[in-house]
Image (tube, helix red, strand yellow):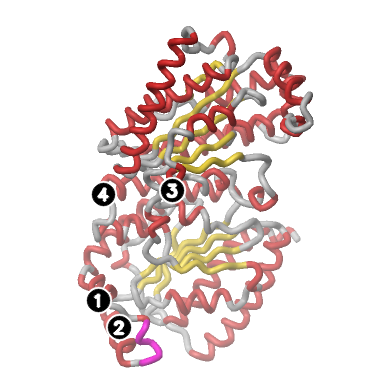
């Protein structure tokens, strides 16, 4: 940074004016092409307080159709945001296809502030760097253009601008306590900014350094960098992302055909154990709320396998204020227009709460794979992306419990026929269920691959034999109780 950073050479005033006009024209044309080709753009604007970030964003958006962009200023994380993973507040802001999202400050400023205050250890910092690099790569692989701008000014120039702002009662408020700390401890903050920028400067998502000593020059630099980035994105929009190795510690799992489906329990045993297990689960739910432990329970399985009844049995024991069940159907248009994991990030629980997913992000490697709703590159890439997603949740402190509810083909047919004959159950059976059944063998291949490649040590799969639904329900509760007891250290209480 500073002398180690190389900036573009500032041209004379007349040349700046001509280049700005050309950049404005290009920007207007490129944003229409981005809309036509459904390419999303995330522009991260970081830098020093009073470096002119807001002014430059305001100048840029004059050249973009207001229907196609959004601007967010990210201040201190709210109490709600601090109870979710670090990346949550950024992931929920990613734009739809063909639209622009401008973030006035983001993950760099948040990390630098926490490191400056001494509240972030080196271990946490390194973990955050890994999370950010993963987040940025996933966006890029999904077709997002991420443009990262850092606005640099000297200590003397920053102090001068602060004095100007504080002299006017209408702008005095814009100089925050953090801004003052930056200037007072300029060299320390500079080192922190430099390290964070260097650690997240990757070939596919590089940082662009803006000499912000002159506001008009900063505007031109930002516009030209954005235009160059848009031009490159339009040229490369059809390129497939590389398939990276899926290097995660895995738990060996059986093939579905090897699962014993004969287990049964009597009605009397079921009633007795269900009552006992639900009572224990209720105790644990209260404790995890007090300890602020987030829990994510994911259900996948064959149609008519009994997921709904299993979820109902599990949640009956929980305080309704502390859990939410998310039935996942086909994505809505605004969900389909974003990264496929976005709609799951937005449904993550707060600390101390439980989120139950009735179908999940694994649709990417099952239904989307087999029905052609995504490319082969997309679903092959997803195994690693999903493992990364779940690792992020695990590192945040979440308990992740994944169930595959297993039945055989004959049991499914019997339940389909029962649903068609029973008026109260008729709504549960659709033409799509019958179509999926015709692809049973293809789905079984996909599910086996999914389980083998995503049963990690931090988020393993649990297969629930569900020919006897009662047995599957009891087993699910036993597994949830065991996993919660592990993390709550009840043996030490």
SS of the residue under disc 1? helix
> Which residue, given by chain and number where applicable, does mark 1 sit on?
434
Q: CA distance from mark 2 to mark 4?
A: 31 Å
Q: Position of residue 419 (x, y in %)?
A: 33, 87
- Looking at the image, tell me whether mark 1 or mark 4 is earlier in sequence order: 4
> Which residue, given by chain and number where applicable, does mark 3 sit on?
387
Q: Is residue 283 left or right of residue 238?
A: right
SS of the residue under disc 3? helix
Is residue 407 on the magenta stretch?
A: no
Q: Quadrant of the C terminus?
A: bottom right
- Looking at the image, tell me whether mark 2 or mark 4 is earlier in sequence order: 4
> Which residue, given by chain and number where applicable, does mark 4 sit on?
375
Magenta residues span: 423-427
> Which residue, given by chain and number where applicable, does mark 2 sit on?
416
- Looking at the image, tell me whether mark 4 or mark 3 is earlier in sequence order: 4
Q: CA distance from mark 1 to mark 4?
A: 24 Å
- Looking at the image, tell me whether mark 2 or mark 1 is earlier in sequence order: 2
Q: Are marks 3 and 2 in contact (CB under 8 Å)?
A: no
As drawn, the label of residue 403 is: none
């Amino acid at each position: 940074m500073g002398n180690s950073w190389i900036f573009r050479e500032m041209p004379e005033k007349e040349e700046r004016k001509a280049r700005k006009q050309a950049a404005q024209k290009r920007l207007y044309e490129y944003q229409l092409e981005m809309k036509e080709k459904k390419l999303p753009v995330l522009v991260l604007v970081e830098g020093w307080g009073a470096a002119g970030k807001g002014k430059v964003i305001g100048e840029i958006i004059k050249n973009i159709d207001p229907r196609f962009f959004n601007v967010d200023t990210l201040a201190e994380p709210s109490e709600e945001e601090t109870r979710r993973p670090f990346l949550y507040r950024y992931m929920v802001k990613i734009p739809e296809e063909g639209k622009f999202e401008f973030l006035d400050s983001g993950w760099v400023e948040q990390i630098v502030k926490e490191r400056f205050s001494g509240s972030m250890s080196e271990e946490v910092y390194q973990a955050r760097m890994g999370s950010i690099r993963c987040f940025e790569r996933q966006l890029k692989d999904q077709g997002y253009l991420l443009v990262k701008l850092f606005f640099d000014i000297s200590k003397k120039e920053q102090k001068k601008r602060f004095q100007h702002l504080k002299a006017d009662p209408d702008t005095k408020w814009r100089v925050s306590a953090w801004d003052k700390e930056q200037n007072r401890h300029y060299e320390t903050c500079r080192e922190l900014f430099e390290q964070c920028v260097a650690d997240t400067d990757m070939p596919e998502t590089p940082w662009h350094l803006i000499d912000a000593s002159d506001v008009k020059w900063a505007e031109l630099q930002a516009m030209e960098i954005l235009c160059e980035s848009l031009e490159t994105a339009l040229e490369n929009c059809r390129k497939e992302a590389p398939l990276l190795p899926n290097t995660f510690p895995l738990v060996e799992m059986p093939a579905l055909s090897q699962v014993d489906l004969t287990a049964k329990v009597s009605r009397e045993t079921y009633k007795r154990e269900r009552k006992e297990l639900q009572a224990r689960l209720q105790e644990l739910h209260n404790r995890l709320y007090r300890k602020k432990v987030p829990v994510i329970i994911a259900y996948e399985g064959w149609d008519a396998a009994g997921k709904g009844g299993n979820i109902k049995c599990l949640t009956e024991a929980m305080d309704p204020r502390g859990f939410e069940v998310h039935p996942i159907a086909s994505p809505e248009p605004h969900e389909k227009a974003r990264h496929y994991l976005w709609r799951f990030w937005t449904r993550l629980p707060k600390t101390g709460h439980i989120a139950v997913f009735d179908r999940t992000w694994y649709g990417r490697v099952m239904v989307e794979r087999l029905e052609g709703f995504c490319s082969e590159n997309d679903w092959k890439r997803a195994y690693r992306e999903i493992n990364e997603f779940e690792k992020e949740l695990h590192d945040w402190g979440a308990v992740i419990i994944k169930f595959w509810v297993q039945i055989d083909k004959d049991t499914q047919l019997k339940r389909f026929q029962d649903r068609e004959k029973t008026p109260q159950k008729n709504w549960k059976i659709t033409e799509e269920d019958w179509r999926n059944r015709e692809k049973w063998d293809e789905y079984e291949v996909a599910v086996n691959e999914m389980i083998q490649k995503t049963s990690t040590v931090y988020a393993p799969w649990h297969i629930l034999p569900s020919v006897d639904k009662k047995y599957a329900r009891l087993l699910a509760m036993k597994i949830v109780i065991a996993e919660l007891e592990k993390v709550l250290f009840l043996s030490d209480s």
